[in-house]
Amino acid sequence: MPDSNGHFLIRPIIAADDPAVAAIIRRVMPEFGAIGDGFAINDPEVDWISQAYATPRAAYFVVEHDGVVKGGGGVAPLVAGDPDTCELRKMYFLPELRGLGAGAALMTHCLDAARRIGFERCYLETLGGMDAAMKLYERTGFRRIDASMGDTGHGGCNTFYLLPLSRGDFLRS
């Protein structure tokens, strides 16, 4: 899915993308102080992310810009959560990809995949200071919630969001 200038492409991750995605995560997270225990940068799956999302009810996508992987994000069941709730996971972009509309496009791609998989809600965790990301989440319809859900292992995150994925949930909320 290219932006209006045709500069980026969103596609499913393949094993050959693993080193690039790991490098993106390890470059971006320290920008926001997300290092040490309790942050996704230390998740074992960072180095083999294509395998981690090659499971039922999971999907991960990369964003290519001028033919180079410069971002990614995915959805998977929320660990120790309601089976109808997925988690938006590991959505990160290199600085040169930001501001091009790739975040909104990837968000739409991930949420469409979550709906096709059959999830009814999407949860995410983030860190205060990731202001542009939080604006994107809120523009997409995510609502801030007071506490974490499930057992993501990301105790360093301090901001939590939830989005109903089905029309019925929007009517009830």
Image: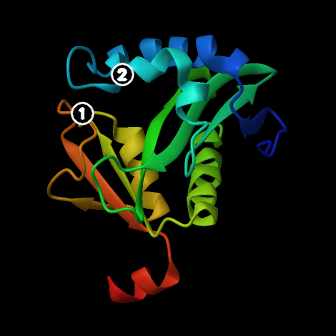
- The front one of 133 and 46 is 46
- Say what amino acid the circle numbered 1 marks: Gly
Q: Are marks 2 and 1 in contact (CB under 8 Å)?
A: yes
* Rendered view: 52 above or below 114: above
Q: Which residue is mark 1?
A: 153
* Rendered view: 60 above or below 170: above
Q: Which residue is mark 2?
A: 43
Residue 14: image quadrant is: top right
Rendered residue at 39%/18% (across/down): 44
- Say what amino acid the circle numbered 2 marks: Asp
Q: Which mark is residue 166?
A: none
- The front one of 134 and 87 is 87
Rendered residue at 59%/32% (across/down): 72
Rendered residue at 51%/14% (across/down): 47
Secondary-structure class at tag 2:
loop
* Rendered view: 101 above or below 114: above
